[in-house]
Amino acid sequence: MKKLLSVMLACLVISPALSSADTASGPITWPYRIFVSGSQSFHYRIFKEGNPISFCSGIHSNEFAYINEADDGAKGKIAALLTAYALQRDIHIQYSVTDADGYCQIRQFTM
């Protein structure tokens, strides 16, 4: 398990870095929940239990942050996210707001 976790975290480290102008960051503390969507967008959604994800801006800023299956490094991000969830660990995400509605796309994160 420890080796698997190390491999998943390494996937996050080697994902491409983004300029600070494109992204912002904020914490998501346990408990949170994950929703896996069957739609073509917002595939893996993270909802904060009790408190909204308030650091995003826009109409939908308090709803969720997400990872799409087509995102760079998505498999590693999703594996690490599910591991953090299973271990009940807090995560700190780096995200970008993808449109005027304020949806937050997770670019990378640490736990």
Image (tube, rainbow, N blue to C red):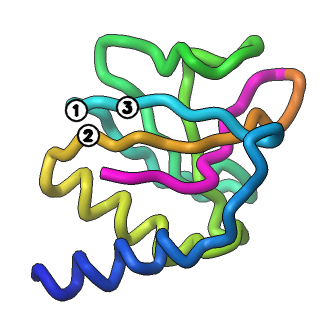
Please tell me which residue is depicted at 60% across the width and 48% down the height of the picture. Answer: 106
Specify which label sits upstream in the sequence, 3 or 2. Answer: 3
What amino acid does circle 2 point to? Asp
Reading the image, the residue beneath label 2 is 90
Q: Which disc number belongs to residue 18? A: none
Residue at 65% over, 33% down: 24
Numbered tag placed on residue 28 in the rendering: 3
Relative to 31, residue 22 above or below: below
Q: Nearer the viewer, residue 14 or 39?
A: 14
The residue where tag 1 is placed is: 30
Q: Is residue 94 left or right of residue 12?
A: right
Are the residues at dot 2 and dot 1 in contact (C-beta closer than 8 Å)? Answer: yes
**Is 40 located above or below residue 104 in the figure?**
below
State the CA–CA distance, disc 3 to disc 2.
Answer: 6 Å
Closest to the observer, 74 or 2: 2
Q: Which residues are magenta?
A: 101-111
Q: Position of residue 81 (x, y in %)?
A: 37, 58
| Mark 1: secondary structure | loop
